[in-house]
Image: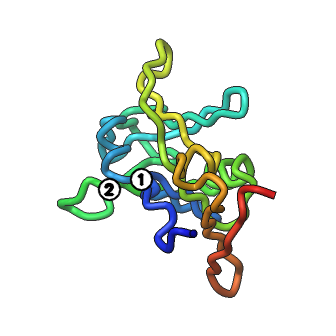
Amino acid sequence: MKSLLGNTRKPEITFFKSGRIDISASVAKHLRLCGGDVIDVMCDNDELYLYVKVRQPNGKHKASVYQTNRHGHNFRTYSKILANAVLNECKTQGVAKLAVATPIIHEQYGTMLPLITSPELFCGAECAGTGIDLHLSFPQRERKIYVPTSF
């Protein structure tokens, strides 16, 4: 039998080819984000870590976050360089909807959130042998394709 709902875990950070990066409230809470903070992604042995590079800097910076609405806790930023680098690491072209793992404390960079880029880790046991849904954007329209995990 096959589940019709499939994976029920919501993505916590989304990277778009256009450079838009949407950050959920849970990620913002873990990183203690404020408007103006600059985020970055660190790569270490094929693992990606999201962290705050600069807290409320003076002047203009790339990947500076802002709240999506006045009363919300979600944040957004634009950085085509950062988004394309993550898309390349995830081996996708359109959209990368990722979850995060338990935060770690790094002595130099502070709180870092490991990004879950593996579909098996993102879905957990519920996806074992059933496949996962990937959302890929194409220039004309967005398509949803089914990718089996077992061959």
Instruction: Name the residue: 32% across, 62% down.
Output: 68
**Residue at image point 21% right, 62% down:** 70
Residue at (37%, 44%) from the top-left corner? 27
Instruction: Kindly identify which residue carries mark 2.
Output: 74
| Residue 115 % position (x, y) | 55, 41
Residue 23 is labelled as 1
Residue 6 image point, x, y percent: 51, 66
- Amino acid at dot 1: Ile
Question: On screen, 143 above or below 113?
Answer: below
Instruction: Point out the image quarter for the C terminus.
Output: bottom right
Give the image quarter of residue 94: bottom right
| Foreground residue among 48 and 121 | 121
Looking at the image, which residue sits at the far bottom? 140
- Picture layout, residue 129 above or below residue 42: below
Answer few, some or many: residues within 10 Å of disc 1's Cα (few below 14, many 20 plus, some between 14 and 19). Answer: many
Q: Position of residue 85 (x, y in %)?
A: 69, 48
Name the quarter where the N terminus is drawn: bottom right
Outermost residue toward the front in this view: 1
Contact? badges 1 and 2 (CB < 8 Å)? yes
Q: Looking at the rendering, which quadrant does residue 69 occupy? A: bottom left
Compared with residue 44, is residue 150 higher up or lower down, i.e. above or below? below
What residue is shown at x 64% (from left), y 64% (from top)?
17
Residue at mark 1 to residue at mark 2: CA–CA distance: 6 Å
